[in-house]
Amino acid sequence: MTTTDRHFLFLQGPHGPFFARLGAMLRRAGARCWRVGFNRGDRVFWPGKDSFIPYDGPADAWPRGFSSLVDRLGITDLVLYGDTRPIHARAVEIARARGLRIHVFEEGYLRPYWVTYERGGSNGNSDLMEIGVDRMQQALRRAEAELPVAPAHWGDMRQHVFYGALYHAFVLLGNGRFRNFRPHRAQTVREEFLLYLKRLLLMPAHWIDRKIATRRITNGGFPYHLALLQLEHDSNFQHHSGFATGAEFLSLVVEGFARGAPGHHHLVFKAHPLEDGRGDQRRQIRALARSHGVADRVHYVRGGKLAQILNQARSAVTVNSTAAQQVLWRGLPLKVFGRAVYAKPQFVSTQPLPEFFRAPTRPDGRAYRDYRHYLLETSQIAGSFYSAPGRRQLLRQVVDMMLAPDDPYRALELGTAAPRQQLHAIN
């Protein structure tokens, strides 16, 4: 199949203009592209009027509508960001049955310096779930000997939050055409917009709070374990964790720490960088710590970068956060409770949680370095969805990968994978 025979249908993407830039480059390569929009935010960030297809029907009619679009437009490729929100999950099921190529973007498994591009599924639905480390090591015989080096500075969190607020503002204020639109999260569009706006306004205060808490911990002189928290509404938590709520995980961790950790050890809960306060984690943690008699040994750090506080940690626990990759890169013991692409037997502990806090087993560092190298040669692409320089760097590589006949993992095994870019600082 030539590029001119490729017909791409985009569904919902990351907030901001990335999908529009991606579609424009695919068209320059000779492919045809359309975008299905479900709300005003989707419309604003896809400037091509003739290639924008509004869907304003009810949710239960979407599978039929999607199938009709595939037939009418001769779609060969489906492009989406995340594969678990209902409209995406239904489309993926139909696309897979029809033999379409399914291109899935996600935040980087090795974030923040890379983004994820896979075929068929991501996170718990990724092909990585079935690829063992021995197979990765075999494929790496064809790879470059040197690993890409991450840049010293990378800044797109403000852009991420800005585009999120802008997107929800468009949906809130101009969504009359899309009366049947319902967000895939529990909050209303107005609530989502206010949460993004609140986060933008409180960034300076949160920075001060985070600095004080981090300094108290790093200068405390006590050994500590780190609990990596996630967004309760994030699809990776909802679909691949086994927990109904984040509070269940908090309770499990505090109880395990109280039962197993030595009396001089502390526990630090690190909030997700995009935590927006829709649930008061700090108050829940304080209440749990008091009930288990460890209130003076449990701490909470609001968002921010992980490296400073992780560098002195003894171990880490998480549901299935991608931040755990930084734990493994440092050779620290790790306990996970959900499905994750890095949850290989060589890396994560199988100990009961109290025993893990008492004397955690370490990962196989050499095997993890091979695993990380494998990801950087396959699904992890240098760049960013949200900053303009990051998008440019991402587009230099990903369009050729999408047009290639083989998915990134298969391409490495066959020796057809394109050389990977070295990273440069992106601000």
Image: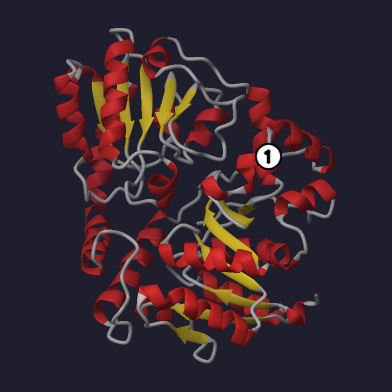
In the image, is residue 296 above or below residue 132?
A: above
Can the viewer see residue 44 in this picture? yes
In the image, is residue 155 above or below residue 179?
A: above
Residue 237 occupies which quadrant of the picture?
top left
Assign the N terminus to one quadrant of the image.
bottom right
Q: Secondary structure at mark 1?
A: loop
Q: Position of residue 175 (x, y in %)?
A: 29, 81
Q: Is residue 345 left or right of residue 188?
A: right
Q: Residue at x 32, y 14 (%)?
A: 222
Which residue in the structure is indicated by mark 1?
A: 131
Q: Position of residue 79 (x, y in %)?
A: 58, 68
Tell which of 271 and 177 is nearer to you. Answer: 177
Q: Position of residue 187 (x, y in %)?
A: 24, 60
Residue, far top: 263
In the image, is residue 366 above or below residue 160?
A: above
Q: Position of residue 234 (x, y in %)?
A: 38, 51
Q: Residue at x 55, y 29 (%)?
A: 328
Residue, far bottom: 50
Can the viewer see residue 34 in this picture? no
Q: Is residue 226 left or right of residue 331?
A: left
Residue type at mark 1: give it: Ile
Q: Is residue 240 left or right of residue 243?
A: right
Local crowd size for mark 1, using a 10 Å CA cut-off: few (<14), some (14–19), many (≥20) = few
How are the residues colored?
Answer: secondary structure
Q: How many marks?
A: 1
Q: Is residue 286 left or right of residue 345?
A: left
